[in-house]
Image: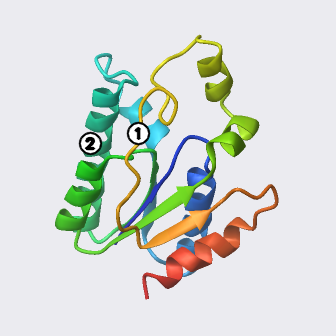
Amino acid sequence: MVIWITGLSGAGKSTIAKEVVNHLRCENQPCIFLDGDEVRKALEDPHIGYDYNSRLIIAKRISRLAQMLEQENIWVVVATISLFKEVHSWNRLNFKDYIEVYVRVDLEVLKERDSKALYSLANKGEISNVAGIHYQVQEPENPDLIIENNSALVDFSTFAKKIISLTK
């Protein structure tokens, strides 16, 4: 089973994914968490930046890694921006069991949260290639679940339970 959680930076993907992993581990389900930022660091490719094409390459690599793990009967929970229809389509065709979750947050809310200062740096012109700012993202066409995460007070455990209920 691959649970693919996607959305813009600051949407809450990693926090939700960690909750899902915690719930699965409490059920003694073998699982692994693949965070897009951490996978990028682990692969350490100096030729891969943050431009559109580099992000697409990383997303495809994460998909392939998740496929390898799924084939070993390990549940994989992925948290990554990877807002590419090409990747979502590949995932649906190549994973045995796949759940796609889109964490949607209004851009203005993301700019307010700005946990990594990406949006403020982008607005100042100090960085480029920020998804949703410098290039249009491709929202999933048919996600299995859309989580609206615009609220300041969020119970991530509730989100995790909704996701896990889709695996039953």
Rendering quarter of residue 98:
bottom left
List the single residue furthest toward the left.
93
> As displayed, is residue 143 above or below residue 106?
below
Nearer the observer, 75 or 16:
16
> What residue would you read off at disc 1?
39
Q: Amino acid at mark 2?
A: Arg
Q: Amino acid at mark 1?
A: Val
> What residue would you read off at disc 2?
61
Under circle 2, the secondary element is helix
List the single residue furthest toward the right.
153
List the single residue furthest toward the top.
126
Mark 2 residue crowding within 10 angstroms, few (<14) / some (14–19) / many (20+):
some
Q: Are marks 1 and 2 in contact (CB under 8 Å)?
A: yes
Q: Residue at x 55, y 58 (%)?
A: 103
Locate residue 108 relative to residue 43 in the image: left or right: right
Q: Measuring from the top left, give residue 85's x and y in whole percent.
A: 28, 51
Nearer the observer, 150 or 42:
150
Quarter of the image with the N terminus in it: bottom left
User: What coloring was used for the rendering?
Assistant: rainbow
Q: Measuring from the top left, give residue 73's x and y in whole percent.
A: 29, 72
Rendering quarter of residue 148:
bottom right
Locate residue 115 relative to residue 20 in the image: left or right: right
> As displayed, is residue 14 above or below residue 118?
below
Quarter of the image with the C terminus in it: bottom left
Mark 1 residue crowding within 10 angstroms, few (<14) / some (14–19) / many (20+):
some
Q: Measuring from the top left, give residue 164's x and y in whole percent.
A: 51, 78
